[in-house]
Image: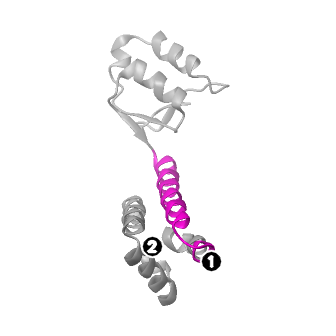
Amino acid sequence: MIVDLDRGKPIATFKGRRAEEVMAWFKSRPQAERDQVDVVVVDRSKTYASAITQLFGEQGHVLDRFQVVPLAVEALDGVVRSVQKQRDPEEAKDLKKLRTRWLKSANQLNVDAWIARDEWRRRFPELREVIDWVQNVRTWFERT
């Protein structure tokens, strides 16, 4: 679907998810109309990203919050897996249990959960960095 975000109205819809159809539609539009495109909000599809780059260059690519948050969680999971490999099996299991605590904001945690998260953050700087980054992403998207 192509939407005019300024007006909040759909401009075009497509039955499939083929980038060629989207590119053909844009190419069928007058250049003056294409020049009015300031921002393109896309999902994480590499196919769409490639098509949009071909059409509009590198400017104006935006991932919406529903695409960014999973990327932040994936980054957290990657660091957790890395730290787990450095720990004995029991401690690695405990680390996995704490994952949900890291995804919550501080005001959603009880005191014990907050202390446990803080302890892991203190012990592992790489966890501290990614937990803080995930929380910053969360805070940014929760603002009004």
Location of residue 63 in the rendering, given as x and y in whole percent from the top left corner: 44, 42
Can residue 55 be seen in the rendering of this structure? yes
**Which part of the image, by quadrant, shows the N terminus?**
top right
Which stretch did the figure color magenta? 64-93
Label placed on residue 90: 1
Q: Residues within 10 Å of mark 2 (few under 14, many from 20)?
A: some
Is 3 placed above or below 104 here? above
Tell me if residue 136 comes above or below residue 123 in the rendering. above
Q: Secondary structure at mark 1?
A: helix
Principal secondary structure, stretch drawn in magenta:
helix
Depth check, mark 1 against mark 2: the one in front is 1
In x, y percent, where is residue 48? 52, 28
The residue under the point 32% across, 19% down is 35
60 vs 50, nearest the viewer: 50
Q: Is residue 72 left or right of residue 90?
A: left
Q: Nearer the viewer, residue 11 or 95?
A: 95
The residue carrying mark 2 is 105
Judge whether residue 11 can be spotted in this image. Answer: no
Above-or-below relation of 138 to 14? below
Q: Mark 2 falls on what kind of element?
A: loop
For the residue marked with disc 1, what is the amino acid? Glu
Lower position in the chain sequence, tag 1 or tag 2: 1
> Is residue 42 covered in magenta?
no
* Residue located 40% across and 59% down the image: 137
Q: Residue at x 46, y 78 (%)?
A: 117
Contact between marks 1 and 2 (CB within 8 A): the answer is no
Residue placed furthest toward the right? 15
Three-letter code, disc 2: Ser
Report the Cα–Cα distance between label 1 and label 2: 26 Å
| Rendered-image quadrant of the C terminus | bottom left
* The quadrant where residue 138 appears: bottom left
**Outermost bottom residue:** 111
